[in-house]
Image: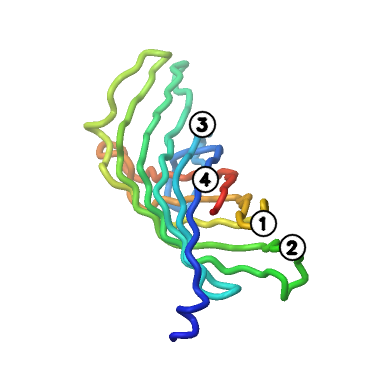
């Protein structure tokens, strides 16, 4: 245990991303709704326990929601969350043939999000969705990506992310869960 703790190293950084979000039934990908642009930005912390295993967390601002057209009415729901993911990261580096600090990784773990704001639009007319939206979202987050060493002491991460919510989003509309796929760029110090 002491030798593991002595090899562990902590790194911090920033993460930005862009992707597509929708809301659908639990086991369906899109449920006939159009995806909407979903930006993310946040802080990341990573605790490297061994060469192939790390714990990763952070605090991220995310936009989720959906867009659809029903009876010639365009509807867009924009939900803004503060999200806390906690992931186990498994990676392969130099022992797998990568050089110069390069690594491929896979991370998985739960996330908990708090709703900051909820806004809807019907044909470009805005309205407040907060009273019909649940305050918390909980789900599972997946990430696959690649690390590059930059400037000798920093790491650049490029990742593909997918979040799948388990909690129904709206109080009046059952069976709709947040889904989001994105690409992210992170810099760890």
According to the picture, the residue beneath numbered tag 4 turns out to be 15
In the foreground, 24 or 104: 104
Among numbered discs 2 and 3, the one appearing first in the sequence:
3
Question: Considering only vertical position in the picture, is 99 above or below 146?
Answer: below
For the residues marked 3 and 4, what is the alpha-carbon distance in whole angstroms? 20 Å
For the residues marked 2 and 3, what is the alpha-carbon distance in whole angstroms? 38 Å
Q: Residue at x 44, y 85 (%)?
A: 2
For the residues marked 1 and 4, what is the alpha-carbon distance in whole angstroms? 19 Å
In the foreground, 98 or 116: 98
Residue 100 is tagged as 2
Q: Quadrant of residue 114?
A: top left
According to the picture, the residue beneath numbered tag 1 turns out to be 152
Q: Nearer the viewer, mark 1 or mark 2?
A: 1
Q: Residue at x 39, y 48 (%)?
A: 59
Q: Residue at x 50, y 46 (%)?
A: 14
> Disc 1 vs disc 2: Cβ atoms closer than 8 Å?
no
Q: Nearer the viewer, mark 3 or mark 4?
A: 4
Residue 129 is tagged as none
In the foreground, 151 or 55: 151
Q: Nearer the viewer, mark 1 or mark 3?
A: 1
Residue 36 is tagged as 3
Colour scheme shown: rainbow
Disc 2 residue crowd, few under 14, some 14–19, many 20+, Cα 10 Å = few
Question: Considering only vertical position in the picture, is 3 above or below 73?
Answer: below
Disc 3 residue crowd, few under 14, some 14–19, many 20+, Cα 10 Å = many
Percent position (x, y) of residue 65? 42, 35
For the residues marked 1 and 3, what is the alpha-carbon distance in whole angstroms? 38 Å
Among numbered discs 3 and 4, the one appearing first in the sequence:
4
In the foreground, 32 or 82: 82
Percent position (x, y) of residue 49? 50, 73
């Amino acid at each position: 245990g002491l030798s593991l703790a002595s090899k562990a190293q902590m790194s911090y950084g920033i993460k930005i991303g862009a992707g597509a979000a929708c809301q659908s039934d639990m086991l369906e990908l899109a449920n006939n709704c159009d995806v909407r642009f979903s930006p993310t930005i946040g802080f990341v912390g990573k605790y490297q326990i061994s060469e192939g295993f790390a714990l990763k967390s952070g605090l991220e601002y995310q936009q989720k929601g959906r867009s659809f057209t029903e009876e010639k009415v365009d509807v867009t729901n924009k939900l803004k969350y503060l999200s806390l993911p906690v992931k186990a990261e498994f990676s392969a580096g130099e022992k797998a043939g990568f050089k110069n600090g390069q690594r491929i990784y896979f991370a998985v773990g739960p996330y908990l999000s708090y709703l900051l704001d909820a806004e809807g639009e019907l044909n470009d007319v805005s309205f407040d969705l907060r009273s019909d939206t649940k305050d918390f979202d909980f789900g599972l987050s997946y990430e696959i990506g690649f690390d590059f060493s930059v400037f000798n002491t920093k790491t650049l991460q490029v990742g593909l992310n997918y979040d799948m919510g388990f909690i129904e989003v709206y109080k009046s509309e059952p069976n709709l869960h947040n889904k989001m796929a994105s690409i992210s760029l992170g810099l760890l110090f």
